[in-house]
Image (cartoon, grey):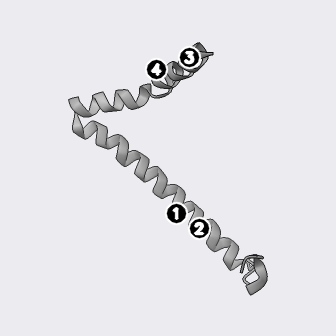
Amino acid sequence: MKDFFYAIQDFFVDVLFAPYDALRALELKNWFAANTFSWIFILIGMGFFVYWMLQLKSFNDNGEEDKSVSAHSYL
């Protein structure tokens, strides 16, 4: 049974966290390259946020949003 948990540990440490180890090693070699990856992820997140806000605005403009006080049971 102990080997099963060691196998899970090895899978996560050696396989799933390998990209994070590579990024950590890259940060020691080239700080700007490592931060470029961070900025790419930030820009992707901001793009999804803008898309989500535009979708909410389109639903709001179409009048599909229920804004009554009793729209949710916890209100």
Measured Cα–Cα span from mark 2 to mark 3: 45 Å
Q: Closer to us: mark 3 or mark 4?
A: 3
The x and y percentages for residue 41 are 43, 46
Residue highlighted by disc 4: 14
Q: Which residue is drawn at 78% across and 83% down?
A: 70
Residue highlighted by disc 1: 50
Question: Which numbered disc, 3 or 1, marks the residue that appears first in the sequence?
Answer: 3
What is the quadrant of the C terminus in the image? bottom right
**What kind of element bears circle 3?**
helix
Residue highlighted by disc 3: 7
Q: Closer to us: mark 1 or mark 4?
A: 4
Q: Closer to us: mark 2 or mark 4?
A: 4
Residue highlighted by disc 2: 54
What is the quadrant of the N terminus in the image? top right
Could you tell me the amino acid type at mark 2? Answer: Leu
Farthest residue in the front direction? 1
Tag 2 and tag 1, C-beta contact below 8 Å: yes
Tell me if residue 67 comes above or below residue 24 in the rendering. Answer: below
